[in-house]
Amino acid sequence: MTVIANTKPYLSSVLMSDATALVADFNYAQVNLKEAANTTVSLGQLVYWNGTDAYRVLKNADFTSDTVLATAAGIPSLPDGSQIGVVVGFNGSIGGEFDATVGTSAVKAFVLFRGIAAVKESGLLFDVSVAAAARKDLIKRQLEAKFIEVKAVAPATGSSFYGY
């Protein structure tokens, strides 16, 4: 039996619901992504304004403490000035590619930066350096302040016959 890519995130492993039906308008915007060295950025990755001209993967160094996210310099390029977003697509499409290699040259990516929308908590990809639960909770609260619900999903379902 052929196995079709099951190790990479699909848009459905990140996004649960969206009031705008995946139209690149109010909830989504295309931004530049840049990294200091080649980095694989995947759907669900959290990105943060780099202070000058692009977004990059959210790192541990972006926090001043477990409950405070640093304020980056400059004016973020998202329409509402959001410093943070969730990657939902690359190169002109929402959900069309699993990931992209991002380096010093800008890669175009779509990010979800405000709602009404819901994402799966398990679909949010934090950089390995962001290990503190309090820091992850801070980001979730910031997303929810932008009307992006972060929802836990049951790992499995069981049968119920309601007494029959």
Image (cartoon, grey):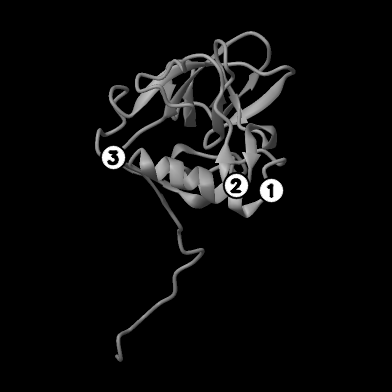
Query: Do tag 3 and tag 2 residues touch (Cβ < 8 Å)?
Result: no
Distance of mark 1 from mark 3, alpha carbons?
Answer: 28 Å
Residue at 61% over, 41% down? 126
Q: Residue furthest bottom?
A: 163
Q: Residues within 10 Å of mark 2 (few under 14, many from 20)?
A: some
Residue type, label 2: Arg
Q: Horizontal and vertical percent for residue 129?
A: 72, 40
Query: Do tag 1 and tag 3 residues touch (Cβ < 8 Å)?
Result: no
Query: Do tag 2 and tag 1 residues touch (Cβ < 8 Å)?
Result: yes
Q: Which badge, 1 or 3, comes first in the chain's sequence?
A: 3
Q: Which badge, 3 or 2, comes first in the chain's sequence?
A: 3
Q: Residues within 10 Å of mark 1 (few under 14, many from 20)?
A: few
Q: Residues within 10 Å of mark 3 (few under 14, many from 20)?
A: some
- Can residue 23 be seen in the rendering of this structure? yes
Distance of mark 3 from mark 2, alpha carbons?
Answer: 23 Å
Give the number of the disc on residue 135.
Answer: 2
Residue type, label 1: Ala
Question: Taking 18 as reference, is 121 above or below it?
Answer: below
Q: Which residue is mark 3?
A: 116
Q: Which residue is mark 1?
A: 131
Question: Taking 39 as reference, is 150 above or below it?
Answer: below
Question: Taking 77 as reference, is 71 above or below it?
Answer: below
Tag 2, which secondary structure? Answer: helix
Question: Taking 120 as reference, is 43 above or below it?
Answer: above
Q: Horizontal and vertical percent for residue 3?
A: 61, 45
Query: Horizontally, is 72 left or right of 22 in the view?
Result: right
Q: Residue furthest right?
A: 37
Q: Horizontal and vertical percent for residue 161?
A: 33, 84
Can you say which quadrant of the picture contains the C terminus?
Answer: bottom left
